[in-house]
Image (cartoon, grey):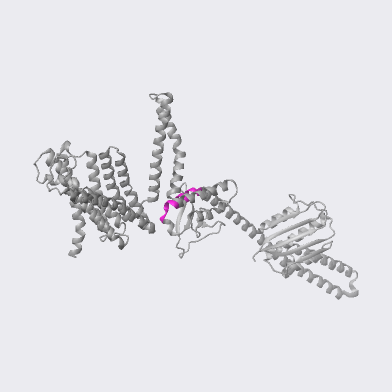
Amino acid sequence: MLLVRRSSAWPWVLAAGAVGLGALAVVLNALAGVRGDPWWQVVLGVSALLTSGAVGLLIALRRPGHRIGWLLLGNALVLGAAFLASSYGEYALLERPGALPGARWAALWDSSSWPLLFAGVTAIALVFPGGSLPSPRWRRTATGVGVSFAALIVAELFTASPLNAPFRQVASPLPALPHAVITPLLAVGYLGVLASLLAAAWAVRVRFRRAIGIERLQLKWLAYGACLIPATFLVCFAGVDGAAAFTALFMLMLVVVPVSVGIAILRFRLYDIDRLIDRTLVYAVLTLLLAGAYVATTLALAVAVGSGSAWTTAGATLATAVAFRPLRTRVQNVVDRRFNRARYDGRRQVEGFLSNLRAGRAAPESIQGVLADALGDARLELRFWLPEGEVYVDARGRAVLDSPEDTRARTPVRRGGVPLAMILHDAALDERPDLIQSVVEAAGLAIEIARLRVELRRQLDEVEASRARIVAAGYEERRRIERDLHDGAQQRLVSVGLTLRHAQHELGAHSNGVGGILDGAVAEIGDAIAELRELARGVRPSQLDDGLAPALRELAGRASLPVKVEATADRFPGALEAAAYFVASEGLTNVVKHAHASRVVVCAARDDGSLVISIADDGVGGAAPARGSGLAGLADRVNAQGGTLRLESAPGRGTTLTVELPCAS
């Protein structure tokens, strides 16, 4: 237990030591007055120290075995020592000479310890993010890095050159080594440190090429923060206010790198690093281009209207504002094409689909396949949200439920804060939130249109199903009436007729004219029975009990012209057979009344999941489904079953009526 307490206390000790060094440095810098460092340098120095110490402390406490935390704490101590050495020397040598002991040592450390400021960043890059080298082969590289920094620090400590400003007049407390020794040490040190920085960058690249998932995101965070290192050297080489610019950028890098490392290790999913890098590149390039355009426009207008005119500034500002939006789009496309190819290609696919959609060359429901191609996920599924039923449906309007065995990730789609759909995709895509967000954002309009169409189609299907149920209920009611007529009224009338005949037989010759009356009554009963049978046949033919084919043949036998029947012997649902029968009956009635035909062919067959009925005649043709006609009513009956009706009736070429009724296969 004691060992655990000691180990957990060390991060606090190191962090407190770094903060103590920084606090003492701030006090001495204030006492040094005008000879101390400028305020902005103090602020950046303290920020770098506190950032490195705080992030190192968090990592060391939450990940005790992680080397990055200890490296950051060590870096904070180096920064505190460097800051203190500078303030100590400025106060004890320049403001109040001799006020404090060891002032020359502080000045020497301030001038010679600068390589250690790069050492921390280099060490972090070599072992980031797991805390170990990329492979055992990198041990020699790590040894070379240590030797290079040590050689450069030794050379800086024992060189005969004057100390750095403002301590050029201060003599070093250490003896100078011979020129023959210092020169090789400096050469090895400078070249080695430069090679160490390149090796650190190469180590990050090696890890990034083979990294996946979380490690890839973490490396992007480090690269984003470390990009200030080459920017610092570029500014230095460009000669932009040399020391001040270099110091500002270098200290800013010492702040950004620990923050990036802390986010990468502790909160790598908190922010979208890909979007951050993308925005940085886009707006950095955009700023340079707009600044160049502003300067060029200003010069051109100055030549045209004069350099002192207010129109010059106004015109340049207006031109820059007008160019901003199209230029940003161009820069965004260039950056995406070069650094985020997947996102660029995905958006291009979606934009191409939207163009086809506007031109009527694509259906909105095809957006699922487009998203699957754009995101590179063949198993991607798009489910539309229907608020009325509070259910997710597929592109056909069928309700879908989540399966506990489905391990795909879910990404909700919203437009204007309104939920539209849910995308089920490979969980690996969660590591590319910028890709999903940009592609889904581009496809938002198509998804919304597709959802509205699916919702409308689902409502229409419900209406058709309701109408079909009503028709089926009507058929069932007709069948009940037909059964009641057959089993009730008809049987009673037959019984009455038989009773009357029996009474007539009993009267015999003594009927005295009653026999004729009974004959008339029996005849009327026979007519009533015939009428009831005809009525029952109109409600639902009893022949349908044996199937559609017998019913059609019986119907053809009662027609007043030759009718040929070609019907399948397959059985179908009762409502479907009744609909087919009435289609044939109405068709034959129209032929008899209007076609003046000599023959008719009635066909009924199963074709690809449908019952197809056709009535073809050789009559005069020219038929049309006018409102209120039998064909119009027939079309309503067919639509109620979800079927289709097609009429071919050229004048003088006869008429063919074809109806397709969907049925179970």
What is the quadrant of the N terminus in the image?
Answer: bottom left
Q: Which residue is at 86% across, 69% downward?
A: 518
Q: Is residue 433 found inside the magenta-colored segment of the image?
A: yes
Residue farthest front in this picture: 180
Q: Nearer the viewer, residue 572 or 13?
A: 13
Find residue 640 and report its image quarter: bottom right
Say whether residue 322 is visible. yes
Q: Examine the image and state in which quarter residue 203 appears.
A: bottom left
Highlighted magenta segment, given as a residue range: 431-444
Q: Is residue 84 visible?
A: no
Q: Main secondary structure of the magenta part?
A: helix
Find residue 281 and report its horizontal and vertical position in percent. 39, 45
- In the image: residue 273, left or right of residue 568: left
Q: Position of residue 211 (x, y in %)?
A: 38, 58
Q: Please state the horizontal and vertical placement of residue 412, each as a whole percent of the image.
A: 46, 54
Q: Nearer the viewer, residue 383 or 11?
A: 11
Front one among 92 and 119: 119
Q: Is residue 617 above or below residue 31?
A: below
Q: Position of residue 464 (x, y in %)?
A: 63, 56
Which quadrant would the C terminus be assigned to in this image? bottom right
